[in-house]
Image (tube, rainbow, N blue to C red):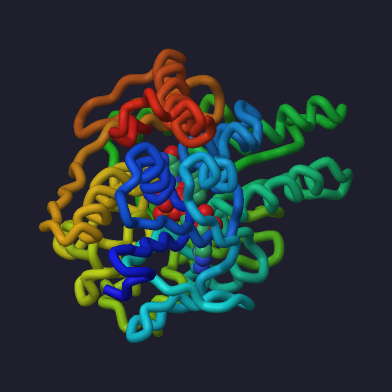
Amino acid sequence: MRPQAPGHTDIVLIGGGHAHVHVLRSFGMRPEPGVRVTLITRDLQTPYSGMLPGVVAGLYSVEQAHIDLVRLAAATGTRLIHAEAVGLDRNAKRILLAGQAPVGYDLTSIDVGITPALDSIRGAATHAIAVKPIGSFLDKFNRLLVDCRHPSGPRRIAVIGGGAGGVELILSLCTRIRQEAGKAKQNPGDFSFLLVTDGEILRTHNACVRRTFRRVFESRGVALHENRPAVAVHEGAIELADGTSLDADLILVTTSAAPPAWFAQTGLALDAGGFLAVRATLQSENDADVFAAGDCAAITGNPREKAGVFAVRAGPPLSDNLRRRAAGRSLKDWRPQRRHLALISTGERYAIASRGWFKAEGRWVWILKDWIDRRWMRMYQEPERMSGAADDGGGRH
Ligand SMILES: Cc1cc2nc3c(=O)[nH]c(=O)nc-3n(C[C@H](O)[C@H](O)[C@H](O)COP(=O)(O)OP(=O)(O)OC[C@H]3O[C@@H](n4cnc5c(N)ncnc54)[C@H](O)[C@@H]3O)c2cc1C
């Protein structure tokens, strides 16, 4: 390793994603002698995916759904560098930054999420809004709300993508836009909503959960088009593979996600999609001093869907293995659960629980989700209180 000073180890975290906020907290609660932790982050406020649809629905404020990384870094004694990482010079053990001097590291960890990939749908880059990554979505959403208030603004709102993100998003948009229309003395009935997806909605969930959501769509008047792949987006319409089209003034895409372009030049092992290929220890397959977690990484032979829940759960094993590597101890394998309890909201204070074959629904599920999400956020939003808290990464979703 490249010593910062004799006996010192520089751990540099790239990106303030869901796994890294836990690493900050963990090292803040239990500093490792001789270890300095640095966070390089492009954004000073990092969003929590579990509460984002709630912000869209108007159930949470933007502040409630974001972690203030400046405050978290200050409370945990972390050095913060506000910059965008654009590359890794692994020979010199330096992280390359946009417009700033490179930063040296002994150990580094990457948790930068994904970038939008609209190329798979023709015209989407021009005529549609990318929902991922979530960090830049809220600004687009605020502009969208302003546009909808305009008399000649969009009235037919569409989401392409039937995963949990897409389903929660269209239902949340429906709630919020109709609510705002009412406040602005517009007719909420002038707005229509649709979701189109290539297969069934919520493919990774059980049939009962899918049936329940179909019922919710119907009761809310949201049109659902399943098994209808979108191939192109034009001004005012979505073109489908079967040659038909759906009219839409405002189109949001939640489907594809790509790895950041700079990964390709790092020489790090990548999976077939170009994401960082890591071992069960969360170390890169071909560089033991580079770790990665969250959406930007994939565990070889044990990949999981790109969901915040796995980024959250990677936090404790990641911080433990960074400590172990810094101390020269052997690392531990992490096997993320195959099944997890998903709590998917309907864009109101109502949610559906899904795990394996299990399904439950009700206002109480939303109350449970709200409690879990707030509890998780408190650990990072109120870091001053962390001394008494458990260092287990909390529960989620
Ligand atoms: C509408 C929507 C709803 C969703 N709802 C859910 C849900 O309910 N449950 C669930 O499990 N998942 C959900 N997801 C998925 C979830 O958002 C992601 O899986 C999750 O955010 C991934 O976390 P992460 O830590 O990998 O990255 P992110 O949360 O994207 O964090 C990456 C961080 O890295 C920073 N960064 C990025 N690039 C750089 C760089 N080059 N240099 C420095 N810093 C950088 C960013 O500023 C950001 O702070 C949803 C997604 C969407 C779009």
Q: Which residue is at the front of the view, 49 or 343?
A: 49
Q: Residue at x 26, y 73 (%)?
A: 1
Where is residue 208 drawn, in percent x and y? 29, 29
In the picture shown, does residue 122 fall above or below 388?
below
The number of numbered discs placed on residues in the rendered structure image is 0
Q: Position of residue 144 (x, y in %)?
A: 73, 48
Q: Residue furthest front?
A: 6
Residue at 41%, 32% in the rendered image = 344
Q: Is residue 58 left or right of residue 53?
A: right
The image quadrant of residue 3 is: bottom left
Q: Does residue 89 appear anywhere in the picture?
A: yes
Can residue 162 be seen here? The reply is: no
322 versus 100 height, above or below:
above
Residue at 53% of width from left, 25% of height from top?
219
Residue 147 is left or right of residue 374, and the answer is: right
| Residue in the foreground of this view, choosing between 315 and 73 | 73
User: Which of 231/134 is in front?
Assistant: 134
Asked if 152 appears above or below 269 in the picture, the reply is: above
Most distant residue in the top direction: 364
**47 or 221, which lies in front?**
47
Q: Which part of the image, by quadrant, shows the C terminus?
A: top left
